[in-house]
Amino acid sequence: MVRGAFKQRAFKHWRGAARGSILAEMEPPDHNPPIRVGAAPDGSLTYLVDLPPEALPPVARRDLERAWYAARRAALAEQWGAVRVFRFRSADGGHSDLVLADRDASCWAGALDSLYGMGTRQGLSLCLRLLALIDLLAHSPWAVPLVRLARDGAEPDPALLHVAATEPLTHEARFDQTGFRARLARYTSQRLTGASA
């Protein structure tokens, strides 16, 4: 999966997203290990994620809403971020890559990294859900009534944010349009009429 240009780079300079005691501890079954983050000499960042995008957890709607406005502020301020490479481990032991090289996507990801951090499953899930929502809106005319255009940007409908916060991602770190629209219709059936997908 490539969003922007991809080029090979060495995985080195690894650091844990969080540091703690060097003593081993008993961990509960639901413990989420941190995502390993590596910085390359060119400033790009690589994330090694121990699960596929579709297994990332849901997030709170209020956090996604906060992320939306943080990304918008960063774009208005032209705070362009670094290129980011995500390497996801699949259930069969393989892996898939997602590259954020697009200037806007890098900007939004940088804003969320500053706000929440992407060295955890929750933070990464929040970032990918925001990007997936923006991607869906760009290709879904039926969703236009759920976004109000304001002077300083777009205002998403709360129902849109709720579904984006809880609907599973696909293996490509996007939303399935059919499933997304079906869930959204439960909340907005009167506003999604007559538009074709």
Image (cartoon, rainbow, N blue to C red):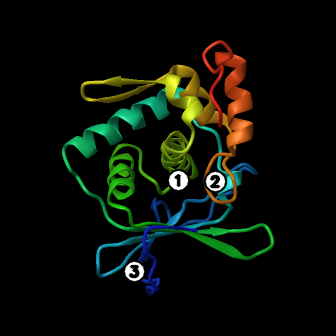
Among numbered discs 1 and 3, the one appearing first in the sequence: 3
Q: Which residue corresponds to the image point at 68% horizontal and 61% vertical from the top-left?
A: 52
Identify the amino acid type marked 3: His
Q: Secondary structure at mark 3?
A: loop
Q: Residue 120: x percent and y percent?
A: 53, 53
Q: Residue 74: x percent and y percent?
A: 26, 44
Q: Is residue 52 visible?
A: yes
Disc number for residue 32: 2
Query: Which residue is label 1 attached to?
Result: 120
Q: Residue 114: x percent and y percent?
A: 33, 49
Disc number for residue 13: 3
Q: Residue 192: x percent and y percent?
A: 63, 21
> Compared with residue 194, is residue 19 higher up or lower down, i.e. above or below?
below
Q: Secondary structure at mark 1?
A: loop
- Judged by depth in the image, the label closer to the viewer, 1 or 2, is 1
Q: Is residue 60 visible?
A: no
Q: Which residue corresponds to the image point at 46% horizontal and 77% vertical from the top-left?
A: 6
Q: Which residue corresponds to the image point at 48% horizontal and 57% vertical from the top-left?
A: 119
> Compared with residue 181, is residue 21 higher up or lower down, i.e. above or below?
below
Quadrant location, the C terminus: top right
Among numbered discs 1 and 2, the one appearing first in the sequence: 2
Residue 189 falls in which quadrant of the image? top right
Pointers 1 and 3 in contact (C-beta within 8 Å): no
Pointers 1 and 2 in contact (C-beta within 8 Å): yes
With 99 as the anchor, is 56 left or right in this view? Answer: right
Disc number for residue 172: none
With 38 as the anchor, is 179 left or right in this view? Answer: right
- Total labels drawn: 3
